[in-house]
Amino acid sequence: MTGQTSMTSGNSRRRTLIVSWGMAVISLILAAGCLVTGSVDIPLDQIARCLTGGEVEREVWRVIVLQTRLPMTLTALVAGAALSVAGLLLQTCFDNPLAGPSILGISTGSSLGVAIVMLAFGGSIGSGWSTYGSSLAGAIAGAAAVLGLLLAFSRVVRSGMMVLIIGILIGYFASSAIAMLNFFSTQEGVHSYVIWGLGNFSGSSLDRTLAFCAVTLPVIFVSFLLIKPLNALLLGARYAGSLGISISATRRNLMIVSGALTASATAFCGPIGFIGLIVPHIARITLRTSNHSVLLPATALAGAMTGLLCAFISAMPSSGMIPVNAITPIIGVPVITYIIVCRKKLLYFS
Amino acid sequence: MTASPILQTFGLSAGYRNGGKETAVVTDVSLSLSPGSVACLLGPNGAGKSTLLRTVAGQQKPLEGTVTIGGMDLQHLPADRLSRLISVVYTERSHAGALTVGETVSLGRQPYTGFFGRLDRTDRRIVEDSLEAVGMLHLIHRYLGTLSDGERQKVMIARALAQQTPLMLLDEPTSFLDVASRLEVMALIRRMAVEKEMAIVLSTHDIANALAVATDLWLILPGGEMMSGPVAEVIASGAMDRLFTGRNIVFDTPAGDYRLKE
C-alpha cells in the first residue's frame, strides 16, 4: 500500500497502514471462516489437511472443502474486489458518489446478456468452461451496450444525477426484457436463470473458479494503471484537461475496465447489488482520502473483505445457502443511508 | 515590458458549434500579451469571457483564426505539451475535499511526472515553493474540504503555479471570495507576474481591484468586438463607457470604477 507522497502527513500514512492491515487481517479471518463454515462439520485439522493435500479421514470432506468452500471463498474475494473497483472507477468517471455498477444498470445489462445466452440459446445445458465463457460473452455485450448508452446520454444530459436516473431506467428496461425472455423460455432454463439471478458465490467448481480469477484479477491490476488520470479527474474534467489528460480517452478506458469487471463478476456470480456502490465509500471514510494511489488498492482490499463477509453470512445456516443478494442490502442500505444523511460532514463531498 | 509576446491571437473568432451551426461570441480578435503582464478581461455577463478563455487555453477549438503561444499554434500542440505552457484556475468547485493541500498542488506536477504520477525531489520542492508563494505552505497537510473559499482558491492558484507555465489563465478567480481574500488574490496575481515573469489573463467583475493589478485591458464590447491595450490607453479611448452600453452606469476615471449616472 505504498504510493502516498510526502504530501500526506505522518498521521495519514499511519492511518493508511493501520486500516489496510486491519482489512487484510479481517479478510483472512473471514476467509478462514468461509472454509470452516457449512452444513457439514469438519474438524479444523482435517480442513487444513484438505488444503495442503494431506491424508483425510473421509474423502467427502476433501470434496466439500476443495470443490465447494474454497471456490466460494475465492469467488467472494475476487468478485467483491472486482465490483468495488468497478464502483470506484464509475464514481470518479461520472463525478458522482452514488454511481455504481448495479445502480447505473450495468449489472442488469450484463444479466440481460446472460439471459439471452442462457434462455434463448439454451446455454445453461453446457458445463465447465463453456458455461462461464458463453455467459461472460453475453455479460460483456450487455455491459458494453449499457455503458455505450450511458456515455451517449452523459454527453447530452450534463447533470450527474440525471445520468444516474437514466441508468436506473435502463436497468428497468433490461429487467423487463429479461422477464419477457423468461416468459417465453423452457422451465429448466428459467429455473437455472432464477438461481443464477439470486446472486451466488458458491455455484462453481474449483476449475471454473480459477478460470474466473484468471480472467478478473488481471483486469483489477489494469485498473491500477489508471491512477494518474483518475486523480486528475478529481478536480473536474476541465482541470484534468488542462493537466494534459485526454478526457475522452480516460472516460473510455474507465468504462472499458469497469464494464469488464462488472461483466465478469456478473457472469460468474449473478447480479450482485450494493457492493460496488458502498465499498468505495467505506474505503474513503476509513482512509480519509480521495487519492487513488491509496484509495484504489484499498477499495480492492475492502471489496474482498466485504465479499468474504457476505459469503460467510450466506454459508452460516446449516440448512443451505442464503442468496448473496439477500445479504448485500442489509449491509448496503445502512451504509448508503448514512452517507446520504451525513454527506455534509464527509470531506470528499466538498 | 518590451519582451516579445508569449501569447498572440490572429483573426480569432471564438464561440460555440452546435450541430452544424456556429455562434461566435467574439470575432476577428487580435490580442497579444508579454511575459510579466497581467491582462484583465472585462465584459458583461454572457459576453463570452469564459468562452474566450477556454479558446485561448486550447480547451475549445477556435471558430476561425489562430492562437499562438511562444510562436506555436495551439492547434498543433499535443495536450501534454500544452499543459506545460498554459495553466488555468476556474471558479467551479471540485469534489476533491478529501485530498490534502499538498496532494492537490501535486496534481499540478502531472505534466512532468511519469506514468503513475509519482513525485521526485524536484517536484516536491516545486510544490512546496508554489504553496510558499501563495502563503499556504503551513496548511500543506490540511484537507481541501476544511479550507475557506479564499484559502481554497489560493491552493488552486498554487496548483497552477506548480505547473510552471509561462501563461496562466484565471476565470473569475475572486467571485465568491470575501473582500480580504479578494485583495490578497489580486496582490498575489500581481506578484506572480512580476517575480515569475508570467503572463497572466484574468476575467473578473471586480473592476476596481483588477485595475490595480492589470497592465493590459481586454474588453469584450457589445456585438463581439474586442478592444485591447495598455490600461491607460484603453481608459483614455473612452471604451470603458461602451462596455455596458444601455445600462445606467458610467466609468469614473479618477475613481477607477463604475458608478451610476446621476
Image: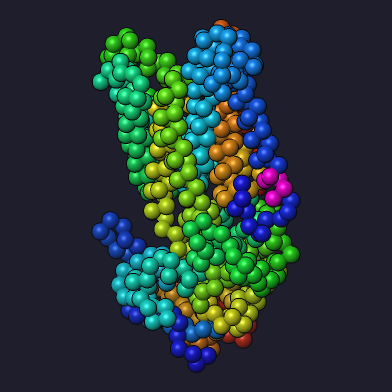
Residue A3 vs A182, above or below: the answer is below
Residue B200: image location, x then y, percent: 53, 77
Residue at screen point 67% across, 33% down = A25
Residue A280: image location, x then y, percent: 57, 39
Q: Quadrant of residue B188?
A: bottom right
Q: Is residue A15 inside the magenta stretch?
A: yes
Residue at screen point 45% across, 32% down = A213
Q: Residue furthest front?
A: A55
Residue at screen point 62% across, 82% down = B195
* Image mark count: 0
Q: Is residue A268 visible?
A: yes
Left or right relative to A115: residue A15: right
Residue A190: image location, x then y, percent: 34, 13
Left or right relative to A85: residue B209: right
Q: Quadrant of residue A132?
A: top left
Q: Is residue A172 visible?
A: no
Q: Quadrant of residue A298?
A: top right
Front in this rendered view, residue B111 or A281:
B111
Q: Main secondary structure of the magenta part?
A: helix
Residue B163 vs A221, above or below: the answer is below
Residue at screen point 59% across, 19% down = A49
Residue B139 vs A332, above or below: the answer is below
Q: Quadrant of the C terminus of chain B?
A: bottom right
Q: Is residue A224 inside the magenta stretch?
A: no
Q: Which residues are magenta?
A: A13-17
Residue A313: image location, x then y, percent: 60, 19
